[in-house]
Amino acid sequence: MSTRVLVVDDSRVIRAIVADTLHELGVRNIVEMADGREAVRAFKQGEFDLVVLDWQMPGMCGLEVIESIRATGATVPIIMVTATGTQQEHVVDAVEAGATDYLLKPFSPTVLSEKLAKHCQVTTSSE
């Protein structure tokens, strides 16, 4: 069975960067969402091995998504993505709510790869 990752960000560019990096690592089972509410619905409908989640999104903010995921009892690793500068205080709130780790925008594919290796046993699918 291959690793299944939920990528949630209202920025199509950020979702593409994350998905491209995951593809480079051999992950093919990626579900992308642009809205927090849609992400929670998707999470409840399937099993995920990792969630990469933006802080600011329409529908529900990243903190609310983390709280909703953790309310299900899920222990899946959640990597919060937030902008540098004044939003760094969001990292503390996110970790307290149950985020496993964080990425500060802008981030490189190398940094994302390191976070994935740290928190997720990546299993590739055969293509």
Image (tube, grey):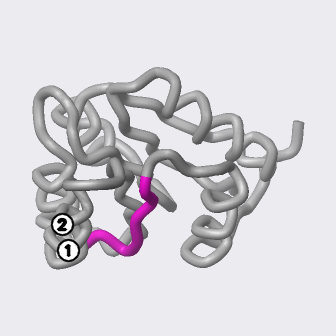
SS at badge 2: helix
Q: Is residue 1 left or right of residue 40?
A: right
Q: Is residue 50 left or right of residue 71?
A: right
Q: Cβ–Cβ below 8 Å for labels 2 and 1?
A: yes
In this rendering, the count of numbered labels is 2
Give the answer, above or below, for where 30 lies relative to 62: above
Give the answer, above or below, for where 17 lies relative to 77: above
- Name the quadrant containing residue 126: top right
- Depth check: give the residue in front, 127 or 99: 99
Span of residues in magenta = 98-104
Q: Position of residue 52 (x, y in %)?
A: 43, 51
Q: Position of residue 24 (x, y in %)?
A: 80, 44
- Depth check: give the residue in front, 3 or 56: 56
- Depth check: give the residue in front, 87 or 14: 87
Q: At 25% across and 47% down in the image, what residue appears?
A: 55
Q: Is residue 105 magenta?
A: no
Direction right: furthest residue: 127
Rounded to the nearest angstrom, the CA distance separating label 2 from label 1 is 6 Å
Labelled disc at residue 92: 1
Direction front: furthest residue: 85
Q: At 45% across and 44% down in the image, what residue appears?
A: 6
Residue receiving disc 2: 89
